[in-house]
Image (cartoon, rainbow, N blue to C red):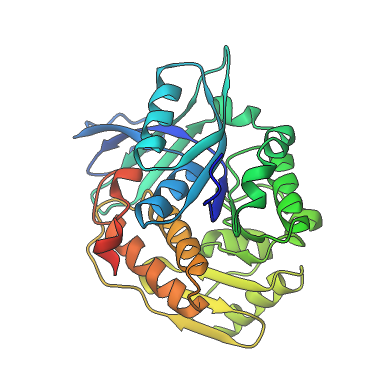
Amino acid sequence: MSQNVKIVVVGSANTDMVVKTVQMPRPGETVLGGKFLMTQGGKGANQAVAAAKLDGDVAFVGKVGDDVFGGNTLESLRKYDVDVSGVGVEADTPSGVALITVDASGENSIVVAPGANAMLAPYDVTNATDLIDNAEIVLLQLEIPMETVTYAAMLAKSRGKKVVLNPAPAPKSPLSDDLLSSVDVIVPNETETEILTGIRLTDDKESWNDAVKAFHSKGIKEVVITLGSKGALYSDGNGIVEIPAFKVKAVDTTAAGDTFCGALCVALTEGCTMDAAITFANKAASIAVTRVGAQRSCPVRKEVV
């Protein structure tokens, strides 16, 4: 196992099958699409690759199937110098697959078949304890079983690591206090914020205050809410800081949030202030949305600095 890992990402790995189309089909409608692209994805793997392409020292803890998709996933992660010693191969189980439709404005619609991702268990995280012990940050999302997310957060917290949670995809039920009390930094978007807090973000800044207070009341020290083309909000409990986005023409927003999270963690491990880390992450995400695909759209370091 690598002794130089600073970021451990525990999460999902998928093969993304992407179709470009002028407009999303309505229920029961068939539309003629355009370009088809098959590439590596999954929120966890995306975040690991995003961080690695920005020169972060990264390990990925996840699970793939014993099939061609799983083999391609491992090959791709290794190509980007991600430590895959924490990735298990599940026999007789398909790897995760995501079906993605992208419309003319760059907005997407995604259906995920989790496959082996659903088999990632707490004991798999326990087996990666050496990786976690050598890291500074453990980054989590919600495309794997919730008990595994919670266990990973609690284990990392107990070992003195900074726990960063991207609560995506948006959960269907409230997150447990055990999970939230183990999180140091939460990074939701506007939709996830509304689902988790019951507060809809509007131009009225009172809604911003109410939302961040709701997160802080769960014991979370730092809140970063991403706002897409409007940038991001940051709170450490002492007021809200607005950090603007970089203006670009979006082509595909598929991995924007994942790129943001990976970049944020890289900057934090390099000693940046949160304001500077968010600016760095905003720039990385703004580059990602100008390209089609997930991991292939994540920028390299020289494009961001």
Residue 290: x and y in percent read 24, 56
- Compared with residue 85, is residue 255 higher up or lower down, i.e. above or below? below
Left or right of 7, for residue 237 = right
- Single out the residue that lies furthest toward the left: 34
Residue 279: x and y in percent read 40, 74
Residue in the picture at 29% in, 70% down: 305
Residue 208: x and y in percent read 58, 79
Residue 123: x and y in percent read 74, 33
Observer-nearest of 280 and 190: 280
Residue in the picture at 69% in, 43% down: 129
- Compared with residue 114, is residue 296 higher up or lower down, i.e. above or below? below
Observer-nearest of 119 and 167: 119
Q: Say if residue 191 shows up in the picture.
A: yes
- Compared with residue 177, is residue 78 higher up or lower down, i.e. above or below? above
Residue in the picture at 28% in, 52% down: 106
- Among the 4 quarters of the image, the one containing residue 146: top right
